[in-house]
Image (spheres, grey):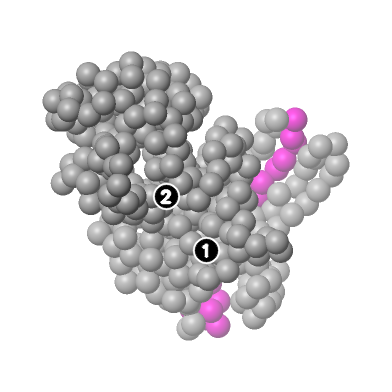
Amino acid sequence: MSLIEQLKQIPDPRSGHGKRYPLWWLLWIMLVGNLCGYRGYRPLADFCAVYWEPLAQWSGTAGQYGCPCFSTLRRLMQQVDFNSVAQVFNQWCEQWMRPTLAQWVGGDGKSIRATRRDAQGANFVTTVTLFTHTPGTVVAFAVMENAKTSEIVVIRALIRQLAECPGIVFTLDALHCQKATVQLIIQQQQHYLIAVKGNQKYLWKTLTAWVTQAPPLSVAQHQDCSHGRQVTRTVTVYATPATLTAHWLDCRRLVWVERRGIRAGHAFCTHSAYMTDLVLSADELLHPIQNRWSIENQLHWVRDVTFSEDDAPRRGGHAPVNWSILNCWLMNVVRQLGCRTVPQGMRLLSNQVQKVCHILLHGFSSA
């Protein structure tokens, strides 16, 4: 099923009175225009006016629709159900962004502050993503209300979406250090590297006691002097004690990470612990453990700083979440094209209507 056919399945929230443009056509305009550098409602209306003929050609409408005004696009983004848009995005990712064997995939949630629903700030919309360490693309996306749903449940649902991708490795934070999550990953013939913290009191106590008395299997170090830091990371791998293997499926290695150095002019020393079913040495785990932070640096930071999602300039109704999905779409395209940064990719795609349409409909071959 093509992307346009998928867009046609999104329910139309508008009433029948005065409805001039079909929903899928407006969504197609906004998606292509956003990737071509026209971010915002008035720029998108200008984009439609300038590129009306190639848009009609690629969408197969034979020019039967005119150019919508910016208020039409604004109302649409505020009204259309973001869960339906996220479903289409996931279908597109499943077709063109499916992770491959032995690829590392991180999972995490990110709140959108502009969607706060109450005065206390306890109820807001959170987007939950599965994100590849390399090349840094979103492969599964979900939306939840913080006051109604647990991120743990949503992450498991996203992991199930990748059931047909055996061999990939999920890197998750301590919130997802749950036996049911580990069991699901193992059942799908996949692997895990999960952080352990004090929220699992018995597990944390057992692990910290073990690493002080057990002989290490391997040790590796890495020096980081970037961005004014002087940090030494030491990764130590241990065998798993019998007291843990009886309760945690296929946990074969415990990993202890020490970060020591100078940051912002102050000395610091921190420790982190991980469980994994992979039988890897410290050298082999050194960079994957560091790269698990890519979901923060390459996804959440870009969405907050480059796209200002946390303080969304385009608000009202479902608009902040719908724009968040368009931002993830843009990042996927530029990363898959091998661009060094998202701004560089945005410049390369600027006004490249035919190229963008080809990617959206036919993938990245000959893009």
Residue at image position (47%, 76%) is 179
Estimate the x, y position of residue 347 in percent, counting from the top left: 45, 18
Residue at image position (40%, 20%) is 46
Mark whose residue sits in front, 2 or 1: 2
Between the residue at mark 2 and the residue at mark 1, the CA separation in whole angstroms equals 17 Å
Of the pair 173 and 52, the residue shown nearer to us: 52
Estimate the x, y position of residue 359 in percent, counting from the top left: 26, 30
Estimate the x, y position of residue 311 in percent, counting from the top left: 63, 42
Residue at image position (61%, 49%) is 114
Region in magenta: 228-245
Dot 1 amino acid type: Glu
Q: Is residue 39 magenta?
A: no
Figure check: 78 above or below 25: below
Which residue matches tag 1? 145
Of the pair 198 and 122, the residue shown nearer to us: 122
Of the pair 251 and 155, the residue shown nearer to us: 155
Residue 79 circle label: 2
Judge left or right: residue 63 versus residue 317. Answer: left
